[in-house]
Structure formats: structure tokens, C-alpha cells
Image (spheres, rainbow, N blue to C red):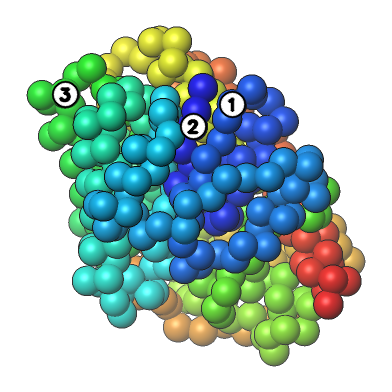
């Protein structure tokens, strides 16, 4: 089983490589051009399990570069993570997001058709639902207007798959709609590593605690939630990673009920930004310097998952608590500090 993992040096991609090495006998091939990651990630994976990951540093939005991977390897399955993912950056650079996220998916689908790669897992997002009033969110929850160009690329990505399978039903897809992946591998040797100023909450928390950032800004305190801050469904990255293995198993075993299945991946528990900050302080016995700022464009007020479909059909349930997420995130940040 030769599995191509795009964005293999990225946050979720690297943890999925680790999970696959720990739980499956797959031959893994990565494609990552290190726009938002570093080559050191593969050294960290090797430090955990001794595996040397084969990586193609290609631009997946370039068809000829992408095709070379399939010409040189007999690929049986694809797990497609590679994408630009910052909501604020997508608001500032929408064309860049459309060009990168949509063309890379288009090229991989085209290669799947040419080289008969029958199993494809697409990294989608809860952002496809928009600012929905239906909570918890189910896979059947109607989409509202995308709140950012990033979210729009995920909506369009799923729609591209839907249109493709109308005439190509011998290929099978699963779209996994993540909620908010956080935390790090239990070894503390690998975790989320933004190359620029973090746009996600937890790495900004850990960098503030480490003194790299002067203070954390919580964007908005007047949302219609229990403490005025946004509500999110935070889920441990290793729980997310393992779901990809189960999804690929389902396609390989031909247990899928349609050519494009969709699953939510979340804990089903909404946690406010302030509650997440308080959890970090409590489990790590640290105090954070934080302030409240204005709302951030593109952010929805509240969203959390109904993941019962994944539990029933994938036999998947998240295992790690918010405390474990925050503890592992700080363990990773401490590892970075010790390395320096």
C-alpha cells in the first residue's frame, strides 16, 4: 500500500505520518515544498521512530511537477493536506489561496484519474459551514456564506470532488471536515510550528508563555457566547491523524456507501477561547499575559461538531481531553526552547 501524503511536513500531515508508521504497514511518500514547514520535520519524525520519509519538494499547483510523483511511484492512495490555511492571510491574499488550494486539488484529482489511484482522502474543514445557527453541526447542516477565502476554497474543493465523481465513480473520496486541531505528539518531539506569527490560538498561547510573544490578543469579547469569546471544538492532532487511517481503511475495504463520503471530526464539545486559555494556565501552572482586542475578520462566533457519523461508520472517537491538548502543546514548546 503506497500512500501519498501531501503536506507531509505540515502540522497534521506530519502527525498522520507518525500515526501511520505506528499503526499501519504502509509505504509513505510525502509531497511538501516547505512553504509553511521545514525539512527538520522529517528529522523529528525519524527521531521518534527511525523512519526516513521520502519527500518530493514539488509545487502541487504545477501539473508537471505533480505528475512526476505518480510517474516515479505506483500510488494506491492519497491523503491530501497540502494547502494554505490562514484565515486572516486568505482575507488579505484571496487570489493566492484560490490559485494554490484549488489548483493543487485539481492536479491531484487529474493524476488520480490518469494513474488509477482509487482512494483519496481530502482535508476539508468545519469552515465550510460558515456562521451556521445549527449546533452541533452535522454533515447534513446546510452551508452558509463562506466567512473567508480559505473557507471558500474548502467549499469549492468539496464541490469539485462532487462534480468529478458524477462521471468517475470508480474512484472513491472521503472528505474529513476538521474542527480545531491542537496539541502535539506525546513525545514532545513534534508539534505545530508556524514559520510566521501564529494565526492559530494554541501556538500563540505557547509562544506567549515562552516569552517569544509579548502578549496574546483574544479577538472579540462581545460574541453571543457564555463569556463573550468565540466557541470552538478543539481536538487533539493525534486523534485527527488516526481518523485518516480509518478513512483510508474504509475506502480500501470498499465499505464506503457512496463515491464521496463526508465526516465531521470533532469532540462535540464547544470550548471558548477564554476557557482554552484558562485550561492552558491550569494544567501547566503558568500565567499568560493576554488582552482583549477587536473581532477578527473571517471568524465565526460559535461552532462545534456532531461526530456521531464518524463514530458509527469509522469506529472513531476522540480520546484526548482539552487538558491533554494543552499539556502536550507546552511540552512541544518546551522541547523547542531546550533545543535552542
User: Does 295 sit left or right of 268 as displayed?
Assistant: left
Q: Residue at x 22, y 31 (%)?
A: 114
SS type, badge 3? loop
- CB within 8 Å, label 1 to label 2: yes
Please tell me which residue is depicted at 66% across the width and 53% down the height of the picture. 42
In the image, which is nearer the foreground, mark 3 or mark 1?
A: 1
Q: In terms of sequence position, does the residue under pointer 1 or pointer 2 come before the other?
A: 2
Residue 16, image x, y percentages: 59, 40
**Label disc, if present, on residue 26 of the rendered structure:** 1
Q: Which residue occupies the foreground of this view, 164 or 132?
A: 164
Image mark for residue 196: none
Residue 29 drawn at (x, y percent): 52, 40
Q: CA distance from mark 1 to mark 2?
A: 7 Å
Q: Secondary structure at mark 1?
A: loop
Would you place residue 127 above or below residue 16 in this image? Answer: below
Residue 320: x, y in percent?
A: 71, 39
Name which residue lies at 41% across and 30% down.
75
Q: Residue at x 21, y 39 (%)?
A: 110
- Image location (x, y in percent) of residue 292: 57, 82
Q: Quadrant of residue 168?
A: top left
Marks 3 and 2 sit apart, C-alpha to C-alpha, by 21 Å
Residue 286 vs residue 24, the one in the foreground: 24
* Location of mark 2 (residue): 3
The disc at residue 168 is 3
Amino acid at each position: 500500500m503506497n500512500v501519498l501524503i501531501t503536506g507531509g511536513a505540515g502540522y497534521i500531515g506530519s502527525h498522520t505520518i507518525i500515526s501511520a508508521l505506528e499503526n499501519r504497514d504502509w509505504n509513505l511518500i510525502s509531497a511538501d515544498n516547505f512553504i509553511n514547514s521545514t525539512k527538520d520535520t522529517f528529522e523529528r519524525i525519524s527521531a521518534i521512530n527511525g523512519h526516513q520519509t521520502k519527500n518530493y519538494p514539488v509545487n502541487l499547483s504545477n501539473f508537471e511537477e505533480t505528475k512526476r510523483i505518480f510517474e516515479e511511484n505506483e500510488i494506491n492512495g492519497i491523503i491530501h493536506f497540502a494547502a494554505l490555511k490562514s484565515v486572516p492571510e486568505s482575507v488579505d491574499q484571496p487570489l493566492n489561496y484560490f490559485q494554490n488550494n484549488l489548483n493543487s486539488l485539481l492536479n491531484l484529482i487529474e493524476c488520480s484519474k490518469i494513474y488509477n489511484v482509487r482512494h483519496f482522502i481530502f482535508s476539508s474543514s468545519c469552515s465550510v459551514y460558515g456562521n451556521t445557527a445549527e449546533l452541533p453541526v452535522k454533515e447534513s447542516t446546510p452551508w452558509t456564506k463562506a466567512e473567508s477565502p480559505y473557507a471558500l476554497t474548502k467549499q469549492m474543493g468539496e464541490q469539485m470532488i462532487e462534480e468529478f465523481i458524477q462521471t468517475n465513480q470508480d474512484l472513491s473520496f472521503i472528505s474529513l471536515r476538521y474542527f480545531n486541531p491542537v496539541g502535539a505528539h506525546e513525545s514532545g518531539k513534534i508539534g505545530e510550528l508556524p514559520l510566521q506569527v501564529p494565526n492559530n490560538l494554541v501556538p500563540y498561547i505557547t509562544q506567549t508563555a515562552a516569552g517569544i510573544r509579548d502578549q496574546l490578543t483574544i479577538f472579540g469579547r462581545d460574541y453571543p457566547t457564555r463569556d463573550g469569546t468565540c466557541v470552538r471544538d478543539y481536538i487533539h492532532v493525534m486523534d485527527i491523524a488516526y481518523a485518516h487511517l480509518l478513512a483510508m481503511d474504509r475506502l480500501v475495504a470498499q465499505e464506503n456507501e457512496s463515491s464521496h463520503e463526508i465526516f465531521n471530526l470533532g469532540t462535540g464539545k464547544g470550548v471558548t477561547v477564554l476557557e482554552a486559555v484558562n485550561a492552558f494556565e491550569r494544567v501547566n501552572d503558568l500565567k499568560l499575559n493576554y488582552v482583549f482586542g477587536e473581532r477578527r475578520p473571517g471568524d465565526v462566533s460559535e461552532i462545534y461538531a456532531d461526530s456521531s457519523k464518524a463514530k458509527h461508520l469509522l469506529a472513531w472517537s476522540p480520546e484526548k481531553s482539552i487538558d491533554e491538548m494543552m499539556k502536550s502543546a507546552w511540552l512541544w514548546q518546551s522541547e523547542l526552547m531546550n533545543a535552542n
